[in-house]
Image (spheres, rainbow, N blue to C red):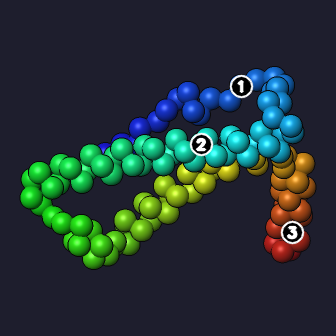
Amino acid sequence: MAERINLDRKAHSKGSQPVIFESETIDALAGMVLALLGEVVVLKDRLDANERLLAAAGLHSPADIDMFAPDAQTKTERSAYRQAIYDRVLGSARDKLMPEALAQQNDYEGVLDAVTRD
């Protein structure tokens, strides 16, 4: 099954951004909270739909779900999904609050990589 992509969520506006709250920090944190809220709501809706469908079909119980042990491929897919969520939720703060720090970190890692290759 292909992951659904919300193109509106992926778009980034151009130009300066107004500061809604007292500071850019609070705006960034509010953005993170709202992004996380959106993820939780979607997750809850999908979980509810699956639980109702499976219960109606008599396929498994909540105890079966509690005993589930994911295989290696499932763990890999979950890891990739988690990273995508982290990027969406934390991206707002990262992009607004830390661009200089990230640039400095990237410069440092580039120098470190060049030195360790020699």
Q: Mark 1 or mark 2, which is nearer the start of the sequence? A: 1
Residue closer to the observer: 49 or 113:
49
| Secondary element at image label 2 | helix
Is residue 74 left or right of 90 when viewed as pictured? left
Q: Where residue 64 sits: x, y (%)? A: 22, 71
Q: Mark 1 or mark 3, which is nearer the start of the sequence? A: 1
Q: Which residue is mark 2?
A: 35
Q: CA distance from mark 3 to mark 1?
A: 34 Å
Q: Is residue 81 above or below residue 31?
A: below
Q: Identify the residue shown where x is 20% and y is 50%.
A: 52
Res 13 label: 1
Is residue 46 left or right of 58 when viewed as pictured? right
Res 112 label: 3
Q: Identify the residue shown where x is 38% and y is 72%.
A: 72
Q: Residue furthest front?
A: 22
Q: Which-is-in-front pick, marks 3 and 1?
A: 1
What amino acid does circle 3 point to? Leu
Q: Mark 3 or mark 2, which is nearer the start of the sequence? A: 2
